[in-house]
Amino acid sequence: MPKEMTCAFCGRPIEPGTGKMYVSERGEILWYCSSKCFKSAIKLKRNPRKLKWARPWVLKSLA
């Protein structure tokens, strides 16, 4: 079975076969659940702690 990944920006789970994988220049592999998360993190360089819809620490504490 494939592993279930979590979004590097918003912290939501990513189903196998979906999402976007980004490999940084340092060799770091980051998974994003949607183009919204990818653009916010990489292109716009937003901080997820300042956005109401991206709350990775809230989702982890509920699980």
Image (spheres, rainbow, N blue to C red):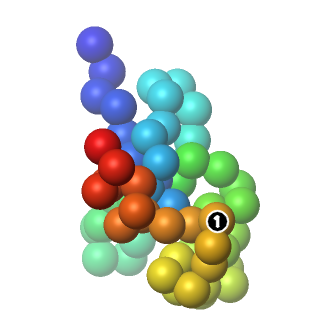
Relative height, residue 28 to residue 47 (above, below): above
Question: Is 1 situated left or right of 43 in this image?
Answer: left
The residue sitting at 29% across, 28% down in the picture is 3
Residue 27 spot, x, y in % from top left: 29, 67
The image shows residue 43 at horizontal and vertical percentages of: 67, 80
**Image quarter of residue 45:** bottom right
Q: Amino acid at mark 1?
A: Trp
Question: Residue, x 51% and y 61% (percent of image)?
Answer: 10
Q: In the image, what residue occupies the spot 71% across and 61% down?
A: 36
**Which of these two is toward me, 18 or 55?**
55
Q: Residue furthest top?
A: 1
Residue 21 seen by the camera = no
**Total marks placed:** 1
In the visual, does 28 lie left or right of 6? left
Is 27 placed left or right of 56 in the picture?
A: left
Q: Please tell me whether residue 60 is drawn above or below residue 15 in the rendered image.
A: below
Residue 42 located left or right of residue 60: right
* Residue 33 visible to the viewer: yes
Q: Quadrant of the C terminus?
A: top left
Instruction: Name which residue lies at 63% across and 73% down.
Output: 52
Secondary structure type for disc 1: loop
**Residue indicated by mark 1:** 53
